[in-house]
Amino acid sequence: MSSVVVIGGGVAGLTTAYRLLQGDPELSVTVLEAADRPGGRLTSLEIADLEIDAGPDSFVARKPWAVELCHELGLRLAEPGASGAYIWTDSGLVPLPPTALGIPADVGALIRWPALSRVGRFGALSDLVRKARPQDNDEALGALLRRRVGDEATDRLVAPLLGGLFAGDVDELGVRSTFPELAAWERTFGSLIRAARAASKAASGAGPIFVKPVAGVHALPRSLVAAIGDLRVRTSTGATEVVRDGEAFVVRTADGDLGADGVVVATPSFAAADLLRDTVPDAARHLDQIRYVSTAVVALVYGEGTADALPDATGFVVPKECAPMTAATFLSRKWPDPAFGDRAVVRCFVGAAGTEDVLDAADEDIVDAVARHLAALLPLPERADASTVVRWPRSMPQYGVGHLDRVSAIEAALPSGIFVVGNAYRGVGIADTVRAATEVAERVRTHVAGTVRTEKVR
């Protein structure tokens, strides 16, 4: 019987294992997870009498892969209970104008938008008349945005939205690995604003942008483990090295060695580098070059009677270094639940490229800072009834300029039979990770089938 070892029990590893078993239920598949539970950041926290997501609280609905996986697993999906969002300004929260990929999609709304100065609006509108200068090579996302819509619109509007998705700095992120659509928009339309307007019209009536399992995103890995089988998922069992054994491999762990015809490394790239350093040094060298930043989630539950203090919106984003948080989700508005009662429930996000020093503070100081800032914006008490901080060290990979070339170099350096998958490579979101895991599972099946045929010929 052919065997595959999947190292890493986050959504990438679990989805890969699930897809492998779908294709061949008789295949020997073992998932190794160093932590005492699978799921990675797709887990929950308990606060007051609530269980809420401690990591991502939704995934993109218009990328079908995570939605399809949830349907296969029998997970019912929920749509947001609110729409629209705000941006933090010195004078308070301002509703975001209509956008597509963060780019203004309505010229009239942009002209009236109070979060930009007259100079800033003129700079953004210049996109409509500036000559297109598409780049042959990858460039920084910020370089493209500043060239098209100017510095002020980039910093006050687009960067908080797009950079926030990566907890990154738009001046360091690469266009082709983050939002290649923007480069295509410049080539095709000669204007990001015209392209955003067309994209918004095309998406009209397409349904919600984000969805989640009714029970929360943390239900996805739990359902995957149930479908894979508990006995195939070994927690508290970290791999220490992957070595060759002829045409096969051995995965070393503290509990003993596991032989494998194929190995899928579904860990963060820095952990993958450590596992492969002696066996595939060229791949490890490229893996080491993917940088990560640390983040944290601050959950706040306010007392009864506070629910109406939150606007009827999903939350707000914050321009860089304007507040201790990078964004906040009005959880009790975005995902209403009878369990919330008449309480306001908010999740704030702290830490990102350039602001990781916020995480050096003690939990109570972080909670105090975000709660005071919220109270200055909204009619909320200065202290929540319950609060907690969940830290995610080195959790967000940074897709720098040339990132996809680096990923290609990693994949080219790997020997046949070793595969990498996860949010470090071709998409940080859950939907993209599910897509990548599905593709890797197919490649693993092809490899294993070839190995079996070779053995039979011999």
Image (cartoon, rainbow, N blue to C red):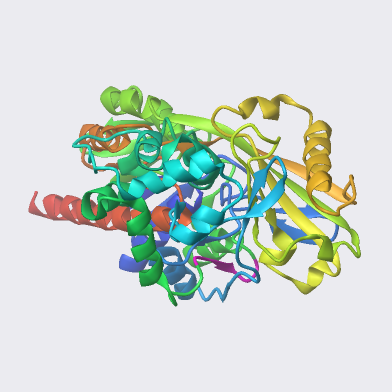
Image quarter of residue 15: bottom left
Point 36% across, 29% down: residue: 287
Q: Is residue 212 magenta?
A: yes
Q: Is residue 145 magenta?
A: no
Report x, y in % for residue 410.
28, 33
Q: Is residue 403 above or below residue 300?
A: above
Front residue of 235 and 383: 383
Image quarter of residue 48: bottom right
Taking the image as shown, residue 35 lies to the left or right of residue 17, namely right
Point 25% across, 34% down: residue: 405
Front residue of 437 and 426: 426
Residues shaded magenta: 209-215
Front residue of 41 and 102: 102
Report x, y in % for residue 12.
44, 51
Farthest left residue? Answer: 457
Point 77% across, 34% down: residue: 366
**Residue 256 visible to an observer of this rendering:** no
Q: Quadrant of the N terminus?
A: bottom left
**Residue 96 visible to an observer of this rendering:** yes
Image quarter of residue 188: bottom left
Taking the image as shown, residue 388 lies to the left or right of residue 56, namely right
Report x, y in % for residue 68.
42, 71
Taking the image as shown, residue 149 lies to the left or right of residue 190, namely right
Front residue of 381 and 62: 381
Report x, y in % for residue 105.
43, 59
Point 57% across, 50% down: residue: 38
Q: Is residue 121 above or below residue 393?
A: below
Q: Is residue 352 above or below residue 388?
A: above
Number of disc labels = 0
